[in-house]
Amino acid sequence: MSHFLKSFLFVLLVLPFVQCKKEVHDPATIVPKNEIHYAKGFSILNHDGFSIVTVSNPWPKADKSYTYILKEKNGIIPDSLKQFLTISVPVKTIVVTSTTHIPSLEMLGVENTLVGFPNLNYISSEKVRVLIDAKKVKELGSNQALNTEVLIDLQPQVIIGYGLDNNNPTLDNLQKNGLKVLLNGDWNEQTPLGKAEWIKFFGALYGKQYKANELFSKIEKDYLHTLKIAKSATTHPTILAGDMFEDKWYLPQGTSWGCQLLKQARGNYLWAATTGTGSLSLSFETVLEKGKNADLWITSGQFGSLKEMLDANPHYSQFKAFQNKNVYSFSGRKGKTGGVLYYELAPNRPDIVLKDIVKILHPELLVAYKPFFFEKLK
C-alpha cells in the first residue's frame, strides 16, 4: 500500500475521533444562546441533558433572581449547579396559581397535568372546566392562603407561584414542607409580546420548547402584521377608559400593557402621558372634564349593557361616547362559573387583542374581521 494511501486512511479513520474529542466540554462552561427575545423577566439556557431557567424580575423592583435547573432523563447536573432547585422534566403534575398560566398549559396540550388551583371559579377554559367537573383539579383556597394540607396531600411535582413583593409566607411554608415552587413573573412584563413569551417558560417544563417557540412565533407574526396594518390609519380616535368603583374612577396608566396596545392600534388614549403600569385613581369630575368628548369608551368590564352602566351611575350619560353608544367591553366571553376569559387569555394572545382594538378604532382596515374579546354595549 502506498504511503499516500496509508496516510489518507489514517486521516479518514482518526480525524472524526479527534473532532469529537474537541467538542467535549464541561456543560457548565458552555455559554448557550438565550432564546428569549421580548420578555425581560426570565431566560432559558439549554445544555446537553438540562436547561437553566432564571427568573430575574418576579415582581416590580425585585433585587434578586431565582435559578431553576430543569433536568432531563439521564441528564447530568454539574456540581456548580447543584445548589439550585432541580426539577425533573417533563413535568407530570403541576399546580398553577394564576389564570394567566392556564392558556399556556392548554396551548401546549398539557392541561391534564393540572391537579390544583386557588379559586376554581375564576377559570374560564372549557377544557380545564371539564377536568374540574371530573374532580381532577382540586380547590386550593386563595393565593394569599393556599391550602397547605391539600397541597401536601397532592404532592405536585411543581407549584408555579407568583409574588407581589418579597413577602410570601404561604409559598415559603410550602417549600419548607418539601414542595418545589417556581416563581412566574409574566404579570410584571411591560410589553404585550413580553407577556406572551412566557409560554416558553412552560414549554421548558414540559420538554416542549420547540412547540412553545412555534406557538409564540405565530403570535409574534400575527401581532407584527396587525401593527403594519394599523400604521396605515389616517385618524387617531380619542379614547376614554375605565369607570367608577365606589367613589373613584379607575383607569390604566399611560405606560401599562393595555395602553401600549391602544397606542399601537393608532388610538389617542387621553391619559397616555401618565407613567406607570398600574391604575390611576381619579374623581368623576376630573375624568368628565378631560374625557367628556372622547370618541369611544372602553370600560373596565364590569358592565354588560348601557342600562347597567346608567343604573350604576346616571352621570355616565354626560359622556359623548355613551350618548353615541360607542362604549366597548371585554366581559362578554365568560366561563361557565363567571370567570372573564379576557383576564385569562388576553396576556397570552396580544395578537388577538391588538386586532380587536384596530377593528374598533379603524373598522375600515379590517372589514371582514369580528372582534373576539370586545363587544359594543347595547
Image (cartoon, rainbow, N blue to C red):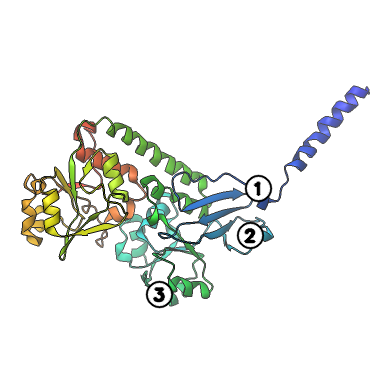
Disc sitting over residue 219 in the figure? none
Question: What's under tag 2, amino acid-wise?
Answer: Leu
Disc sitting over residue 147 in the figure? 3
**Where does residue 60 sit, x and y in percent of width and height?**
40, 59
Pointer 2 residue: 81
Q: Residues within 10 Å of mark 2 (few under 14, many from 20)?
A: some
Residue at position x 46%, y 53% in the image:
41
Classify residue 75 as left or right of residue 316: right
Question: Which quadrant of the view contains residue 281?
Answer: bottom left
**Where does residue 315 sit, x and y in percent of width and height?**
6, 57
Question: Which quadrant of the view contains residue 19?
Answer: top right
Question: What's under tag 1, amino acid-wise?
Answer: Ile
Can you tell which of label 3 and label 2 is closer to the viewer?
A: 2
- The disc, 3 or 1, on the residue closer to the chain's N-terminal end is 1
- The disc, 3 or 2, on the residue closer to the chain's N-terminal end is 2
Pointer 1 residue: 30
